[in-house]
Image (cartoon, rainbow, N blue to C red):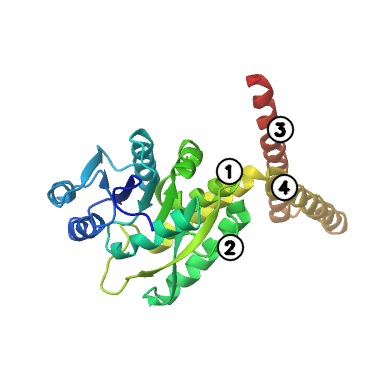
Amino acid sequence: MVKKGEKKSLVLIPCFNEEITIASVVLKSKDYVDTVVVIDDGSSDDTIEIAKKAGAEVLSHIKNEGKSQAIKTGFQYALDHGYDYVITIDGDGQHNPDEIPLLLKDLEEKKYDVALGIRYGESTEMPWWRKIGKRVLDYTTSMGNGGKVTDSQSGFRGFNKKALESITPRLSGDAFSVESEQLIRSHDAGLQMGNTRISCRYKDLNTSTKNSASHGFSVLSYVIWMIAEKRPLFFICIPGFILLIIGILFGIYTFQIYNKSHVFPIPYAIFVAILVIIGVVGMFMGLMLHVLPSIIKRTRN
C-alpha cells in the first residue's frame, strides 16, 4: 500500500455549498495523503472558509461551472504539481475517507491506472430508485465504450499520473457527466481500470445539489451524444435512413388514401413530412460526423 510521503498523493474534493460536511471530509482525508485540495465551484455559503480552516488548499471558481470543470481544474493542478496518485471524493459526506487506502493500494499493488470505487451490497444505503437509474447509466456508459462498467456514477476514484495525463486534456463534458466521460476516455486511451468495493451513505444525507431525475437525464443525454459522436453512421445515419424509408412508405399510403377518397389526409401528410425531414437531416448529420474527423485530420497533417 502507498504510504503517505513516499509517492506524492492528493485528494481532490469538488464542492458546491457543502459547508455542513466539508470539514469532516477534509480532516479524515488528510490522514492518508500528502495534500487535500478542495475545488470550490462558486459556493455561496462558507465552504471555502471552513475547508481552509480544516487544512485543505482551496481552488475557487468565481461562478458555478459544473462538476466536470471542477474535476478538470483539480486534475490540472495535480499534473502541474507532480502528484503520482490522485483520489477524487465527493464533499457531501456520502463516501468514507477511511477507505482511501483501498484505492491507493489498488493503484500501487494491482497497477490500475484507474481504481473505480464501486458501491456494492449491504455496505451501501443506496435507495432502490437510485439503483435502477445507476444501472441504466452503467449500461449506457458501457455502450459508449466505457468498458464493462459496474458503477459508472461513483465519484470516489483513484488515478495514477498516466491516467491524468491521458484523460485531462480530453474532458469536455459539463455538470455531472464527468464520471461517465472519465470511463469512456480512459477506455479509449487503453488505460487499465479495476473495481474497488466501497461503502456509501445515503440515509439522512442530501447527496446531490441537483434533482436526481434531472441529474440522470443530463448524464444520459450526454453519454448518448458521445456514443452517437463516436459511431455516427450506426447511431445517426442508419436511424435517419430507417425514418426516411418509413416516411416514404407512409407517403405512398397517403396517396393511396387520396386516390380512393379524393380527400387529401392532411394529418398523414404532416406526419410523412416530419419523418422525411428528420430522416434526411439524420442521414446528413451522420455522414458529416463520419467524414469531418478524417477531413480535419488531413488538414492538420
User: Between marks 1 and 3, how big is the CA–CA gap?
Assistant: 22 Å
Mark 1 or 2: in front is 1
Mark 4 or 1: in front is 1
Mark 3 or 2: in front is 2
Indicate the position of residue 194 as horizontal and vertical percent values.
52, 59
* First in residue order: circle 2 vs circle 4: 2
User: Between marks 3 and 2, how big is the CA–CA gap?
Assistant: 28 Å
Out of 206 and 269, give the one closest to the viewer.
Answer: 206
**Does residue 283 lie above or below 298 as drawn?**
below
Q: Which residue has dot 4 on it?
A: 240
Mark 1 or 3: in front is 1
The quarter in which the C terminus is drawn is top right
Q: Which residue has dot 3 on it?
A: 291
Per the image, label 2 sits on a secondary structure element best described as: helix
The image's mark for residue 139 is: 2
Q: Does residue 94 show up?
A: no
Image-based side of 256 in relation to 63, left or right:
right
Q: Which residue has dot 1 on it?
A: 189
* First in residue order: circle 3 vs circle 4: 4
* First in residue order: circle 3 vs circle 2: 2
**Does residue 47 lie above or below 293 as drawn?**
below
Instruction: Say what amino acid the circle numbered 4 marks.
Output: Gly
User: Between marks 3 and 4, how big is the CA–CA gap?
Assistant: 16 Å
